[in-house]
Amino acid sequence: MLLAGIMVRALLILLLAFLAASTPTLGADKQGAADAAKWGRRTALVIGNGTYKSAPLTNPPHDARLMADALKAAQFKVIKLENASREAMLKAISDFGDEIEKGGVGVFYYAGHGVQVRGENYLLPVDVTITREEEIRTRGVNAQEVLDRMASARNGLNLVFLDACRNDPFPRSSRGAAQGLAKMDAALGMLISYATAPGSVAEDGSAGNSPYTRYLASTIKTPGLRIEDVLKRVRSSVRQDTDGRQITWDNSSIEGEFYFVPGEGTAPAAVDTGTSAEVAFWNSIKNSQHPQEFELYLKRYPNGDFAELAKSRRDALASGDAPAQPAKPVKGRQAGRPAAPAAAPAAPAVAGERTAVALALFPRLPASRVTEQDIEHAYRLKERLQDIDETRARQQAALGAAGRGGSIQEFAERSWRQWRADVDRLVAAKKLDQADEQIAEREQTLGIETE
């Protein structure tokens, strides 16, 4: 059917857009220039909390300023908060998530008090008042939710730096025995760096900054250092500075190379290389003859750079009054709205389409190991996941209108995001039968009828 064909093509467009924003170029491991420039936009959220009433910390605000300056020097757009309330932290995290959805590299840095409760980590705002352990879960900011928000942006590369394993701000009698932060898993395309090993306590420092942040901020300025090499140098410096009392730790699932500051053999990092998901998406549909594809763009980017143009193309195609001249590719974000392009008689085929689709669906596998049956199976799973997303959104809206409890809602939302990420990982690893089982169970739970 025509509609089914359009939906399959729409999925291909989204996959190619994600591929352009998130995956290495061919031969990237051999070419530092490609690795340095491919990530595009750079956005960071930096938070330093110190003015706690019960257990103040001197250095976190200083650490936040030092880190913000270092990231700005590395061409990051920085959102910085000092001594933030819970409300301010949650809003900043939400805004940050919206920013990194535009593509590129996301960095989240936090300095201040952080504690673990039953294996979950919480970052503490300065307005927090805790008398019982269970209050941490409702008055702190769940670190896993920050990671989930970053992972859901699908922007290609996310780096998380937590200088939050400092002295416990609460009496031992009020909490369990666990010290420091708990280990968290890094989603694909994410690296998590801790000031010290999970379960250990980091030092606040006596020189105006914590040892971890002091060495991190200085080391990322070194040209030509991969992120992995940056962290190795930081680990060595912190260990020597603290006489072995503090050993930094990291957990990574990133692919390709990333340099904060490219060296002589690498190209300068660009703020916008034109490979963001939005631009790639637009270039994939700009000559389309299907109004549904422009509608799909508008749903994905309602305030995008090409929104007005997409509306015009959609309406023209729907009325049968579309021009016939193909549009030129867009190389980056425009200062103003681009002039309306016309459509070719048919959308051009994408060069290397099958390989691109295979890489987008299964980024960890060589295209030679992906069969047509695998691609078709994955497409079907993606379509079913889209149905699940839409059905759940409708049900959640109805529950919200009925006044569902906030804490229950938050728990359900965390569980949902974790399930969604797990299924995406199964598909990416080509464990399609396992993903199929998970999706079938969810369809049954949501009451979705399948053939």
Image (cartoon, helix red, strand yellow):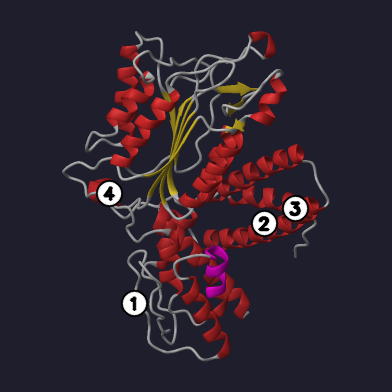
Give the Cα distance between marks 4 and 2: 36 Å
**In the image, residue 126 lies in the stretch drawn in magenta:** no
Give the Cα distance between marks 1 and 3: 42 Å
The residue beneath circle 1 is 328
Q: Nearer the viewer, residue 105 or 139?
A: 139
C-beta proximity under 8 Å, tags 4 and 2: no
**In the image, residue 299 lies in the stretch drawn in magenta:** yes
C-beta proximity under 8 Å, tags 1 and 4: no
Residue range in magenta is 294-302
Quadrant containing the N terminus in the rendered view: bottom right
In primary-sequence order, the first of circles 1 and 2 is 1
* Position of residue 328 measured from the top left corner of the image (x, y, whole percent): 34, 77
Q: Residue at x 39, y 52 (%)?
A: 23
* Position of residue 370 measured from the top left corner of the image (x, y, whole percent): 47, 56
Q: Nearer the viewer, residue 343 or 340?
A: 340
Give the Cα distance between marks 2 and 3: 10 Å
Q: Which mark is residue 389?
A: 2
Q: Which mark is residue 396?
A: 3
Q: Nearer the viewer, mark 2 or mark 3?
A: 3
In primary-sequence order, the first of circles 1 and 3 is 1
In the image, residue 196 above or below residue 293: above
Give the Cα distance between marks 1 and 4: 25 Å
- Label 1 sits on a secondary structure element that is loop
In primary-sequence order, the first of circles 4 and 3 is 4
Quadrant containing the C terminus in the rendered view: bottom right
C-beta proximity under 8 Å, tags 2 and 3: no
In the image, residue 435 above or below residue 334: above
